[in-house]
Amino acid sequence: MAAALIDGKKIAEEIRQEVKDEAGRLREKSGVVPGLAFILVGDNPASESYVRSKGKACEETGFYSITERMSADTTEEALLAQVKRFNTDPKIHGLLVQLPLPKQINEQKVIEAVSPQKDVDGFHPYTVGRLVIGEDTFKPCTPAGVQELLMRSGNDPSGKHVVIVGRSNIVGKPVANILLQKMTGANAVVTVAHTGARDIAYYTKQADILIAAIGRPEAIRGDMLKPGVVVIDVGINRIPDASKKSGHRLVGDVHFASASEVARAITPVPGGVGPMTIAMLMKNTLKAAKLLTAPSN
Ligand code: GUN
């Protein structure tokens, strides 16, 4: 059996178009242009590339965006001062400090300095707390993208056993908290497996929906899955490949060839979850702009 492909690129484009249309209406009605600020510290090539793609998405969606670049030896104090400036800048509705940060900077301190009203990453403890108790908030972009992918590909998680492999603050923990809520688009029975498990396959074999976010290339193979499972692969890993001009290729946390023999549906890497993250960032920024400029504010 060959699994159906879940086309994240196409679904992300649909969402970006919806956000663009709604942003156009907001602009017509109230003159508000959603604004997103990026802070990029140092010269990590992956971070550079992510911020560039996010900036381009803003342009295509009709948002204002600005990128503040700071050198790798920036002090924590200088970074916190920059966060404060964007927190109080009325043109800015969303603020994203690209992670990871250089080691002289306490990442958590920076995350907690971002105004919760502009926390479009969904990383501030206030935002995380609201997510856990099921209150409306900014959902972190990749987990929100996973939820949208499931719903828009006709794989409602309600009543299903979702097994998440990975427990990071950015993906594993928030996706678990989103999918277990008693809400539309959620209501799943959730298991979180991780590198501390003695036998990962014991858990993955029980999944109706498997979400791989463990950060290990091709770690989940077809023989670890139940026939008919829906596989969402959040991993993006670079592995050496002499046949490519670049000398490498991207693979997920799932071994695609063997998993697609067993699964009913699967996301490719690239072109699965990746494009969804940016689409959801646009959605969160629009939400922030609306909330911050609502007449009652
Ligand atoms: N680094 C990797 N992913 C992310 C993300 O979603 N947001 C931020 N701010 N940094 C990241």
Image: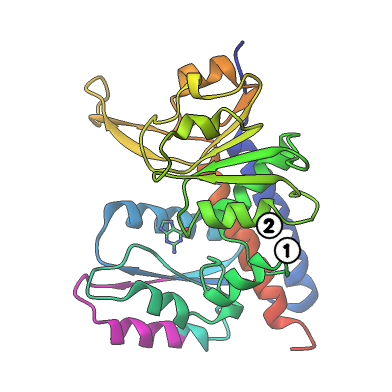
Residue bearing the label numbered 1: 24
Report whether 157 appears left or right of 140: right
Where in the figure is residue 21, as x and y percent of width and height? 74, 57
Ligand 1's quadrant is bottom left
Residue bearing the label numbered 2: 20
> Within the image, what quadrant is residue 262 found in?
top right
User: Does 73 appear above or below 163?
Assistant: below
Quadrant in which the C terminus is drawn: bottom right
C-alpha span from label 2 to label 1? 6 Å
Local crowd size for mark 2, using a 10 Å CA cut-off: few (<14), some (14–19), many (≥20): many
Where in the figure is residue 59, as x and y percent of width and height? 54, 59
Query: Is any part of residue 241 visible from this angle?
Result: yes
Where in the figure is residue 213, as x and y percent of width and height? 47, 43
Local crowd size for mark 1, using a 10 Å CA cut-off: few (<14), some (14–19), many (≥20): some
Q: Could you tell me if the residues under marks 2 and 1 are in contact, i.e. CB atoms within 8 Å? A: yes
Give the residues drawn in magenta, as a range.
67-85
User: Does 189 appear above or below 134?
Assistant: above
Q: Is residue 81 magenta?
A: yes
